[in-house]
Amino acid sequence: MRGIDLSEIFGIVQAYIITPKNIDKPFFPRRDKNGTLLFPKGKFVGVYLSEELIYAQKLRYKIFLLKGYTFEKKTSIFKNFISEVYESRLKAKKSGDDVMSYGYKILMNSLYGRFDINPKSTITEICKRKRYEELTQREKIIMGDKLSDDYYIVNIDSAILGKPLLEKLVSSTVLGLLKLEYFVKEGIFLALKCYKLVIKDDKKVMKQKGPSKNYVNADWFQSQYKKPSTTQNISIESNFRIDWHTLNIAKKVTQLSLRLQMGNKRDPVYDENDLWIDPVPKEVLDLAGEDTSVLKIDLQMVEDELDNKNKELAFKNLKITNKDQEYSKSKISLVQEVVTLRQRIQLLKDTSLPDDQAMSSHQNKNKDSKKEKKKL
């Protein structure tokens, strides 16, 4: 697919991607060998929507197409349906009809799934997650295009920003725009889903994923911020615990460690006192079995860079040559001017008496005039 302009296609493409060297908030997601979702920098091969790749080029990513499937780009057949259902939901919410509001919401959220069902089929197809991930990827592009680089937390449908969005992007009623939930007075952001906010009237909002979410408080966030390696062990009592191997239900007490998972998504940065001050993106090199294709691209890039360097060198040499020629011309001109001046000086010497001869002649004339006076 080399030589194809991304702006002319629409589809799912495998591409060799090189991220900008100093990027702090990479755009493309990848899973490592342990299944952890990362947003790394480096060089890798992945399968993404063409729309994502086009947006990444604006972020100074280098994109090299390897292969893919392209489709004819068409307007969504569900656009009018969604607009009408959304308007109905707004009316239901305004009238206080929570049941109908929830019903309209489910209709919109389950739209693709319901219309994809074949009522005559008796076969249930179990597919890999990758097949449907493209349905949510475009929203990530839309979010990224609206947000500045000044953000703290970004999810698929929400974000915590350092600066307000443009007014045209914010509305609590218009479909597709973002709703302003609250203004944040203070925040501690330890991880993607691990943060504490202080909002209006000093109300606290805390988010923590996993089994420890019900056991963290404001003091815990403060202590973790001051010393991220802090670990607190607690006991959790579960009154209804299922053992799926034996199908027994029992009351169980388990031990839980309240701590941050350091370095699993980004690499920590420490100061001279060995204190954690910031995270940076992990760097990866994953060619996904496309080593030959990627090496050819790398070779072509090196050859292109070498060719550009040679052109630059030739241009510099040309400039130096031109300067040398200008210098030589200037030098020749100066030498000619010196020669001309010397010739003029010599000519003046040849056409006029020397000073001592002129003085001697003047003295002789004076003597002759004195002799003539005496005779008289």
Image (tube, rainbow, N blue to C red):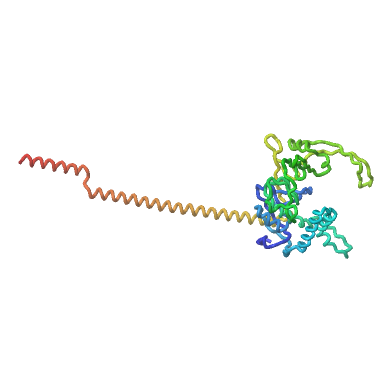
* 29 sits left or right of 235 in the view: left
Residue placed most toward the observer, 326 or 251: 251
Q: Position of residue 308 (x, y in %)?
A: 57, 55
Q: Position of residue 65 (x, y in %)?
A: 69, 58
Q: Residue furthest left?
A: 376
Q: Position of residue 317 (x, y in %)?
A: 50, 53
Q: Residue at x 23, y 50 (%)?
A: 351
Q: Residue at x 78, y 62 (%)?
A: 81
Q: Residue at x 73, y 41 (%)?
A: 187
Residue placed most toward the observer, 282 or 304: 282
Q: Position of residue 281 (x, y in %)?
A: 70, 46
Task: Indicate the quadrant where residue 252 lies.
Answer: top right
Q: Residue furthest front?
A: 95
Tag count in the figure? 0
Q: Is residue 56 above or below residue 355?
A: below
Residue placed most toward the observer, 292 or 246: 246
In the picture, which quadrant includes the N terminus? bottom right
Specify whether residue 41 is in view. no
* 375 sits left or right of 11 in the view: left
In the picture, which quadrant includes the C terminus? top left
Task: Indicate the quadrant where residue 240 lies.
Answer: top right
Specify whether residue 84 is in view. yes
Q: Residue at x 77, y 64 (%)?
A: 77
